[in-house]
Image (cartoon, helix red, strand yellow):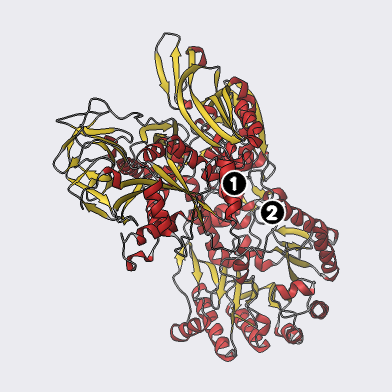
Amino acid sequence: MTKTDLSHIRNFSIIAHIDHGKSTLADRLIQTTGALSAREMTEQVLDSMELEKERGITIKAQTVRLTYKALNGEVYTLNLMDTPGHVDFAYEVSRSLAACEGSLLVVDASQGVEAQTLANVYQAMDANHEIVPVLNKIDLPAAEPDRVKQQIEDVIGLDASEAVMISAKSGINIDGVLEAIVHRLPPPIGDASAPLKALLVDSWYDAYLGVVILVRIKDGRMKRGQKIRMMSKGSTHNIEQVGVFAPRMTPVDDLGPGELGYITAAIKTVADCNVGDTITDDRAPAAEALAGFKPSIPVVWCGLFPIDADDFEKLRESLGKLRLNDASFHYEAESSAALGFGYRCGFLGLLHLEIIQERLSREFDLDLIATAPSVVYRLERNDGTEEELHNPADMPDPTLIKTISEPWIKATIMVPDDYLGSILTLCNERRGQQVDLTYVGNRAMAVYRLPLNEVVFDFYDRLKSVSRGYASFDYAMDGYEEGDLVRISILVNQDPVDALSFIAHRSQADKRGRSICEKLKDLIPKQLFKIAIQAAIGGRVIARETIGALSKDVTAKCYGGDISRKRKLLDKQKEGKKRMRQFGKVEIPQSAFLAALKMDG
Amino acid sequence: MSGMEPLALYIHWPFCLAKCPYCDFNSHVRERIDQARFFRALRTELAWEAARLGRRPLASIFFGGGTPSLMDPATVAALIADATTLFDPLPNLEITLEANPTSVEAARLRDFAEAGVNRISIGVQSLNPIDLARLGRQHTPTEAIAALELARARFPRLSFDLIYARPGQTLSAWRCELRQALALAADHLSLYQLTIEPGTAYEALHRQGQIILPDDDTAAALYDATAEEAANFGLQPYEISNYAQPGSESRHNLAYWRYHDYAGIGPGAHGRVSLGDTLIATRRHRAPEPWAQRVETQGHGSTAEEIVAPEERGREMLLMGLRLAEGIDAARFATRTKKSLIDAIDHQTLARAIDAGYITWDNTRLRATGEGRKRLDSLLTALVL
C-alpha cells in the first residue's frame, strides 16, 4: 500500500439506532470502494463482525480501511471504525471515538431519531467529531425526510439541511456518502517527524498471532522491527507485524500519522496492553503521553461459584482463558460457607459481569452461581489499620470498625426535559447530590454525585425506563467518602446465606431488606415445607416473609409397571439434590442470587 | 415363607382401537389382530412363569391393556382356567377385566362374566361429550351410561375411571360431573388428575401451550373436592386416585401398593416375584409381535431381569406403600425388604413431616396423611434414603 498524506485520510465512525441500516451502509461502502469483490459480499461484513463479537470479543473495536477515488480525481484512505456502545465500556468507546475525527449519523427516514442514537451522538460530540447526518431508506413509501431532518435539528441540535439522502439497501447515493466523508469530515492532523505517539485503541488475543493491538498514530511512524514502549507500564516490545484491516488483516510496511492499523509484538496477554495507553518509540520516546489515559479498574465485584463443586478447576482454567483476552476483568480465589470454593471477580460494570458470566456458561459449559454485585469499600478498624472490602461476607464485626468509606461517582445525565423530574427523583432516591443542572435547548444536563453502590445494581435500567430510553448517562469515579453503612444478612429458615448478604446505607436498610425478602419469596419455588426468609442487621430482624408449602405434587397413576421407573426417578432426583445448593434445607435456584438484589422502583 | 406369598397375576392385552392422546401405556393399534396367535403366546408364557414360580396361592387376576375387552371371551376363559389350574386360587379370587364402554364391547360383557370375570373396570374418563372427543375416546356419554348399567347387572363388583383437571375444567363443573358419575357408581372409582406423559400427543400440545394444566393450588382444590364428593357417596380414598366402599378396594392393585408378589404376562408387563429369598423384577418385551415371536421360540418374552436388592426393595415399598391411606406396616416392611423401616428414611425429614401433619408414625405403622399424600412426590424425595 502506498503512503497517504494526512489530507487524504478520513477516520470516521457510523452512529445509528439498531435496524437503521448501519451494517448495510457499511457493506455498501466496502463494496463501492472495491475492498471486497461482489462475490465476497454475500454476507454482511459488519454483521459477521457482530457475530464475532457475540462469540467473544464483545467489547472490542473493529476497523475497515477503504480506498476511495473521489470525483475530484484524488484517492483517499477512509478508515471506518465500529465501536462498542454500552456505558460499562464508556471509556473504551471514548478511546475508539478519539481515534476518529468525524461520524456519520445514520437515521431511518421514516422512523426518525431514536433513543440509542442520542447517547452515541453526544459521545461523538464530546470527542469533537464533525457529524454528517445521513437519511437512510428514503425510497420507502413511509419515508418523511423533511420531518426527520427537522427532528434531527430539534432533538440533537445538528444542522440537517444538507443531510445525505440515501438508500443503503437499494444502493442509492452511496457515492454521495463517500463524497461527504471526503469533503465534510476533517482530515487528521499529526507530524510524521515528531516522536512516535500512538493511541492504543483496543487489543485482543489471537491464537496464532498472540495479542493484536489496534492503534491510531498521532505523530511519528510505526514499522516492523521497531522497539516500542507502553508509556503507562514502561514495558517494551519489538513490533513483528504492522498492518491494516482491508477488511482482512493485511500487512503494510509502516503506519504514519492519522492512520489506523494493527501491530503484533509477541505479547502474551492483553493485560500488558491498556486501552487508552500511548505507545511510543523506546529509542526516541515522546516527552508526554496522549491525554486521557485511565487504567481499567474493576468497580463491581461478585463471587462466581460452580454449581457442581467438581467444576472448580474448570472455572479456574476458564477464567484464565477469558483474562487472556479481557484485561479489564480481575479474579481472585474465594470460599463461601454456603457456596464452597469459587472466585471473587471484578468487572467494569454490570453488563460486563453479565457478559463474562454468559461466556463462562456458553463457551466453557459452566453452571455458575453469581452472588450479588458489590463495590469496593474501605474500612478503618479501631486499631487504625485499613483494608479494602470486596465482599460483604468478609465484613468484620461492626464493633471493630471505626469507619467505612464507599466509592462515589460523578454522573452526567442528559435527558429531554419531559423526563427530568423522574430522573431527579431517581437520583435523590439513590442518595444523589445535585452538582449542576443546565439546559441545552429542550435537553437538560444534570450532574450528580452518587454513591457507586446505589448505581451498581440496576441504576442504568431504571434510568432507561423512567426516561423511555432518552437519557444518556456517563460517569467518572469521584473519590471515597465515609458513610453510615451496615451489612444486611439474609436468613433462610434461620440459616444465614453468606452469598446473599450485602452492604447498604442505614437509611436504605429497611427498604432494601424488605425488597429482597419479597423478591426471594417470588424467586424460590414453593417446597414441601414452608420457608421463612428474614433480613437482619446483626441480630435484629428487619424484614421477614414466609413461602407457604406447595399444595399438591403427586403422580396420579402408579401401578405395577411404574415401580422401576418411579424408583429410578427418585434415585435421579436424589442425585440432583446432592448437587443442588441447600440452605437451611431449602433449595435456592441460582437465578435468585443475582435477581434478588436488583432493585425495582 | 416368601415362597408362599400369594400371587397377583397381571395379563396384558396390548391392542386398542385407537391411541388416546394422553395415554403412555403399552398400547398398539393394528388393522387386524391375530387373536389365536396372541392367545397361544399368553398361555405359553403363563405356563412358563408358573413353572418357575411353582404352585402358590393365587389372590387375583387382572386383564389390563391396551383394551382387554377386545379379547375373544374364549381366550379370557381359557387363561382363567389355566391360571386357576397352575396356581391355587384363594376362595375369594378377584378377576378383573378392563373394558371400554363402546356398544360393541358392552355387548360382550355377558360373555366375560360367563368366562369367570367377577369385577369389571370401565374406562369412562368423562361424561362430557366434548371432552370425551378431546380425550380421543371412541364412545359417547350415553354409551358409557348404558355400559355401566349393563355392567352393574352382570358383575358383582364394578369400577370405572374418570380423568379430571382437564383443560378449561372449572371446580364447579367437575363437582357437577362427578356427582353425576357417583350416582352411577357401584363400589369403586378411579379418579385421575390429567397428567402430561412424555411422548404422548398431549405432551406436544402442552409444549405448544395449547394444554394448560392447573397450578398446584387449583389442582389441590380439585383433589380435595373429589374426596369430599366421593365421601358423600360412601367411597373412601384408599389410594391417591382410588376410592372404594370399605372392603371393595381393588385387591389386585393393593398387591402393587402393598408390595406383594405379582407376575406380569404379556407384552411390556412388569412383575416382582420372589424366587426363594430373591426378589426379581421381571419385564417383557414391549412390542407385541416381537414379544410373541420370543414366546414362540423360547417359551417366554422376558427381557433383562434384575434382582431387587434390599435397599431398593425398601425404596420401592416406601414409594408404593405411602400412596395408601393405610400406610406401611413396619413388621411387613422388615420381612419383605430385610431392612428396618426406620432405617430406610431420613429422620430429620420425618420429624418435620410429622410436625407439618404430612406423616404419622407410631413405631408399627408409617402413614402419609391426606395432606402428605397430596404432596407425596416431594415428600418421598426428601424422606426416602
Q: Where is residue B14 in the image (x, y as percent from the top left)?
A: 59, 79
Left or right: where B345 falls relative to A35: right
Q: Residue at x 71, y 48 (%)?
A: B371
Q: Mark 2 points at which residue?
A: B215
Compare residues A76 and B208 and report the one nearer the observer: A76
Instruction: Residue A541: tell me if it is visible.
Output: yes
Question: Mark 2 belongs to which amino acid?
Answer: Asp
Q: Mark 1 points at which residue?
A: A151
Q: Is residue A71 above or below residue A269?
A: below
Q: Is residue A60 above or below residue B2?
A: above
Q: Where is residue A420 in the image (x, y as percent from the top left)?
A: 63, 32
Q: Residue B249 occupies which quadrant of the picture?
A: bottom right
Left or right: where B218 falls relative to A27: right
Locate the N terminus of chain B and report the quarter of the image it occupies: bottom right
Q: Do the residues labelled 1 and 2 touch (CB within 8 Å)?
A: no
Instruction: Residue A599: tell me if it is visible.
Output: no
Q: Which mark is residue A377?
A: none
Q: Say few, some or many: other residues with alpha carbon within 10 Å of mark 1 (under 14 / 14 to 19 / 20 or more).
A: some
**Of helix, strand and loop, which one carries label 1?**
helix
Q: Residue A313 occupies which quadrant of the picture?
A: top left
Q: Position of residue A488 (x, y in %)?
A: 56, 25
Q: Where is residue B214 in the image (x, y as percent from the top left)?
A: 70, 57
Question: Mark 1 belongs to which amino acid?
Answer: Gln
Left or right: where A199 falls relative to B191: left
Q: Residue B268 occupies which quadrant of the picture?
A: bottom right
- Protein chain holding label 2: B
- Protein chain holding label 1: A
